[in-house]
Image (spheres, rainbow, N blue to C red):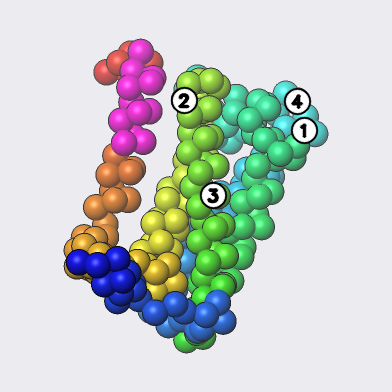
Amino acid sequence: MTAAARSTARAADRPPARRLTAVVDSGRAFGLLLLIAGALGLAASITLTLEKIRVLENPNYVPSCNINPIISCGSVMRTSQASAFGFPNSLIGLGAFAVVVTIGVVVLTGARLPRWFWLGLQAGTLFGVGFVTWLMGQTLYSIGAVCPYCIVVWIATIPLFWYTTLHNVRHGVIPLPARSRPATEVVARYHWVVPVLWYLVIALLILNRFWYYWRTLL
């Protein structure tokens, strides 16, 4: 095959470029996911913010989520990692999850949003999942305690990233070669596998990291 023929074949394999202003349809199920996951993360962020305020007002305050030496929000709140950007991380959650809830409501009304909007949400959820992954590592291997409300934020962020990515791939917001379409459909059919495995890995990491404590409860 000549170079020109190979170039033509590659061009034919690529989907047509979509403009950033091209509108994208979104299903009701995705809108519900955004609404529910966003509300879950927002509730956890609000609770964390209120608990942080009480800790700042009274250093002797014991947060409601201090359950034992391992499950302890107070131990996490007082670390530098809890204010990674110079202010409480929960404030990021307040803004980010409020936006997600709003997007979920807009999608449920049947609105068709432009491609650039979904690329923005993709960037936001990518940052979010990267940030919570870093926080997981800090929680497990540096701080040595876990915050239940933080775990709720992790639980909400993972499906937001995964299903936003899946939505954007299936609707052409993120263009992929035509030959990848069958694999994309298989992944979409078994969409639940990735988040379930993700949660399982987190649970196993927590179990392994603090096994010295868990075994005392048996």
Q: Which tag is nearer the camera, tag 2 or tag 1?
A: 2
Camera-nearest residue between 195 and 117: 117
Badge 4 amino acid: Pro
> What type is the residue that disc 1 sits on?
Leu
Between 20 and 57, which is closer to the camera in this rendering? 20
Say which amino acid is labelled 3.
Gly
Q: Which residue is mark 1?
A: 56
Please tell me whether mark 2 sits on a helix, a strand or a loop.
helix
Residue span colored magenta: 201-212
**Residue 76, image x, y percentages:** 59, 28
Q: Is residue 109 left or right of residue 47?
A: left
The earlier-in-sequence mark between 3 and 1 is 1
In the displayed structure image, the side of residue 104 where residue 211 appears, left or right: left
Among the 4 quarters of the image, the one containing residue 212: top left
Magenta span contains residue 211 = yes
For label 2, the crowd category at 10 Å Cα-Cα, with few meaning under 14, some 14 to 19 and many 20 or more, is some
- Alpha-carbon neighbours of circle 1 within 10 Å: few (<14), some, or many (≥20)? few
Q: Main secondary structure of the magenta part?
A: helix
> Which mark is in front, 3 or 4?
3
Task: Determine the image quadrant of residue 186.
Answer: bottom left
Residue marked by disc 2? 140
Is residue 41 visible in the rendered image? The answer is yes
Q: Earlier in the sequence, mark 2 or mark 4?
A: 4
| Marking on residue 59 | 4
